[in-house]
Amino acid sequence: MTTLFTIDLTINMPEGGRHARQLLNFYFSDMLVDINETAYNLCDANEAIQARKFDKLTLKRADVWASQEGSLKIFALLSVSGEDSTFIKQVIAKYMGGFPGYLKKASGGYFSRTGFPPDISLQPTDWSAEVHKA
């Protein structure tokens, strides 16, 4: 039996100026695709297993802002249906391991190859995910 869960994902990144905020806002539309792909791979590429363990992922809210400490704060509120929170946390941890690569891929669609601003770091300084029953 599946349960609806919410995921509060908070990511801290070095400040990269206006271009970094624009890139992150641009990336939010691809975030669900990358998280779903991560879940699919953790389900041994089996759609039936994924439908049970990690289904109907939805982005409820996403924000990015510059903090007073000089870093970028990213917050995403997601919901997903699944059997247990342990697997959901595993998916998010695996996704965050590949996060710099996902941003790099998104940057190719946002910036031209020669126009990628050098002041944007794609590596989070830290992150946290809280998973709750909805």
Image (cartoon, grey):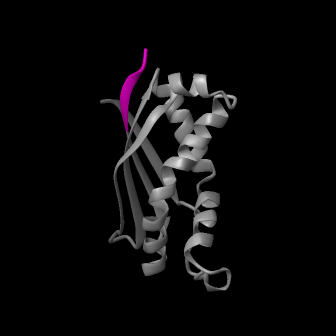
Is any part of residue 121 visible from this angle? no
Question: Magenta stretch mostly in which secondary structure?
Answer: strand
- The residue positioned 58% from the left and 46% from the top of the image is 95
Q: Residue 99 at x, y = what percent? A: 58, 55
- State the residue at coordinates (44%, 34%): 56
Q: Relative to residue 131, is residue 74 depicted above or below?
A: below
Q: Residue 62: which quarter of the image?
A: bottom left
Q: Residue at x 61, y 41 (%)?
A: 38
Residue 84 at least partly seen: yes
Residue 39: image location, x then y, percent: 58, 36
Q: Which residue lies most toward the front here?
A: 47
Q: Furthest residue to the left? A: 134
Residue 30 vertical position relative to residue 18 in the rendered view, above or below = above
Residue at (66%, 27%) from the top-left corner? 46
Magenta stretch bounds: 1-6
Count of marks overlaid on the render? 0
The x, y position of residue 118, in whole percent, is: 61, 82
Which quadrant of the figure has residue 116? Answer: bottom right
Query: Is 24 above or below relative to 7?
Result: below
- The answer to whether residue 40 is magenta is no
Q: Nearer the viewer, residue 104 or 58?
A: 58
